[in-house]
Image (cartoon, rainbow, N blue to C red):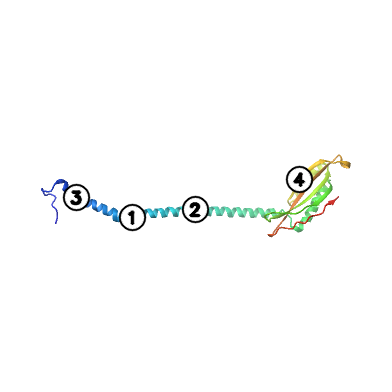
Amino acid sequence: MAIDLKSRNIPQFLKIIIIVVPAVVLVVLFLTVKYSPMNKEIKILEAGIAKLDNDIATAKVKVRKLDELRAEAERLKVLLVGLRQQMPEENEVSVLLKQISDLGLKSGLVILLWKPENKKPDPKGVYTEIPVKMEIVAGYHDLGVFFSYISRIKRIVNISNIKIQKAGGNYSDLIKASFTASTFSAVYDAAAEGSPTGAAVSR
């Protein structure tokens, strides 16, 4: 049965209540039944999307880092190949050592001592250092010429522990120098090379 709101017996405030209450009830029902679950589901989806975005960003960083590591590994491999090409193999070491000795004589050095020392394997197994202790008598210029010759050798040869003093006796106008000349033998397997001790040779 329809309510006649034009009836003069119904107070004005009651008319307003009759009109407004159904609308409020409908809004409350919508918020309770429809909107709240949807809003909760939206928040869950938004949180899931945010997590996925974060995971994607992290994965991109990891991929970029992996690419950088791979590039660095390739660069180091190329560098290692280049260094190994400058290192004699084991069967070439004696030839290189003789070359160093010949350059000393060519430079005018008087070689007093030529003593191969213990080999020193690289902890990473990349090379073996082969040092030779030398004592010579020469002029300053002759020693400089010898070092210059050494620097031009294609193979790696390091000069270290240089000690220079004035020579005495028959060489009073010259200098006496001692130093270590080291070359490096490439190691192509996991095991380091042995380390026999060479004997001193006086000249």
Q: Earlier in the sequence, mark 2 or mark 1?
A: 1
Q: Is the Cβ of the residue at disc 1 closer than 8 Å to that at disc 4?
A: no
What amino acid is at disc 1?
Answer: Met
Q: Which residue is pictured at 37% across the width and 53% down the height? A: 43
Which residue lies under the disc numbered 4? Answer: 161
Residue 2, position as x, y percentages in the image: 14, 55
Which residue is nearer to you in this view: 88 or 114?
A: 114
Q: Is residue 57 left or right of residue 192?
A: left
Which residue lies under the disc numbered 3? Answer: 19
Q: Which mark is residue 58?
A: 2
**Few, some or many residues within 10 Å of mark 2 (<14, 14–19, 20+):** few
Q: Is residue 125 left or right of residue 174?
A: left
Q: Please, what secondary structure does the residue beneath circle 4 have?
A: strand
Q: Which mark is residue 38?
A: 1
**Few, some or many residues within 10 Å of mark 1 (<14, 14–19, 20+):** few
Query: In whole angstroms, how far apart are the C-alphas of marks 2 and 3?
Result: 57 Å
Query: In whole angstroms, how far apart are the C-alphas of marks 3 and 4?
Result: 106 Å
Query: In whole angstroms, how far apart are the C-alphas of marks 2 and 4?
Result: 51 Å
Query: In whole angstroms, how far apart are the C-alphas of marks 1 and 3?
Result: 28 Å
- Quadrant housing the N terminus: bottom left
Q: Earlier in the sequence, mark 1 or mark 3?
A: 3
Q: Is the Cβ of the residue at disc 2 closer than 8 Å to that at disc 4?
A: no
Q: Earlier in the sequence, mark 2 or mark 3?
A: 3
What amino acid is at disc 4?
Answer: Asn
Q: How many marks?
A: 4
What amino acid is at disc 2?
Answer: Thr
Q: Which residue is pictured at 46% across the width and 52% down the height? A: 54
Residue 175, position as x, y percentages in the image: 83, 41
Q: Please, what secondary structure does the residue beneath circle 2 have?
A: helix
Query: In whole angstroms, how far apart are the C-alphas of marks 1 and 4?
Result: 81 Å
